[in-house]
Image (tube, rainbow, N blue to C red):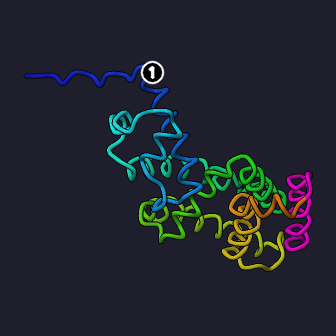
């Protein structure tokens, strides 16, 4: 009986090169979208040759899917942390704050996600169905329960979530416009404004 050999752990150089490729690809995809991005652009941005990139990934789509898979875990984490046993208003406002922080800390990731959605989500639809939909359904039920208990004002829970996404991710997806129009304290002002806005909307 032949026992398969254990998978060989990647070397430090292989791990470094893979990280270089993914980081460069994130820049390229966030700037040009999936359709506008090329392996040649990723090669130039990473400082590696195109054949070297193809040693690690089967092609452009494989790189893009890897980035999306990594992104979804980070993207969903703040919503996972909404505590049904917590103080409702503060739980929602904490979620808003973390989404603002992510917009400023991960603008490339936000634009990668936005570009994928704008193209009809051809590569991320399984994640939306298997991961995002059940999570949003769960949080919607939690918010409905808080409203029924009189702990939050009457709002549509799903459209509340949509509004949080729209107002926070705007700062990443429209970063170039925000930089032209806003002052140097844009992040602090965004956090204060959105906290006040959602607090007024949700407070009983």
Residue placed furthest toward the left? 1
Picture residue at 47% right of the left edge, 59% below the top: 34
Q: Is residue 51 left or right of residue 193?
A: left
Relative to 30, say whether 19 is above or below. above
Instruction: Using the rendered view, name the quadrant where residue 162 is placed.
Output: bottom right
Q: Nearer the viewer, residue 142 or 81?
A: 81
Q: Is residue 59 visible?
A: yes
Q: State which quarter of the image contains the N terminus.
A: top left
Picture residue at 88% right of the left edge, 69% below the top: 197
Element marked by disc 1: helix
Relative to 156, say whether 55 is above or below. above
Relative to 78, say whether 51 is above or below. above
In x, y percent, where is residue 182?
88, 61
Q: Which residues are magenta?
A: 183-204
In x, y percent, where is residue 130?
45, 61
Q: State which quarter of the image contains the C terminus.
A: bottom right
Q: Is residue 183 left or right of residue 65?
A: right
Q: Is residue 181 left or right of residue 7?
A: right
Picture residue at 45% right of the left edge, 21% below the top: 13
Mark 1 Cα-neighbour bin, 10 Å: few <14, some 14–19, many ≥20 = few
Q: Main secondary structure of the magenta part?
A: helix
In x, y percent, where is residue 68?
50, 52
Picture residue at 71% right of the left edge, 57% below the top: 172
Q: Is residue 119 magenta?
A: no
Badge 1 is on which residue?
13
């Amino acid at each position: 009986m032949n026992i398969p050999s254990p998978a060989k752990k990647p070397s430090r150089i292989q791990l470094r090169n893979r990280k270089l490729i993914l980081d460069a690809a994130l820049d390229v995809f966030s700037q040009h979208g999936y359709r506008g991005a090329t392996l040649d652009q990723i090669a130039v941005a990473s400082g590696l040759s195109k054949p070297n990139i193809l040693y690690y990934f089967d092609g452009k789509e494989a790189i893009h899917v890897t980035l999306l898979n990594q992104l979804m875990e980070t993207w969903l984490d703040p919503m996972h942390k909404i505590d049904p046993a917590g103080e409702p208003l503060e739980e929602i406002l904490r979620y808003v704050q973390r989404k603002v922080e992510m917009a400023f800390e991960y603008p490339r990731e936000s634009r990668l996600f936005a570009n994928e959605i704008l193209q009809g989500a051809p590569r991320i639809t399984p994640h939306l169905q298997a991961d995002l939909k059940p999570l949003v359904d769960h949080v919607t039920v939690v918010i409905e329960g808080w409203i029924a208990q009189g702990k939050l004002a009457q709002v549509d829970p799903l459209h509340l979530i949509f509004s949080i996404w729209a107002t926070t991710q705007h700062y990443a997806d429209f970063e170039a416009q925000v930089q032209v129009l806003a002052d140097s304290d844009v992040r602090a002002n965004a956090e204060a404004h959105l906290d006040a806005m959602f607090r007024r909307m949700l407070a009983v």
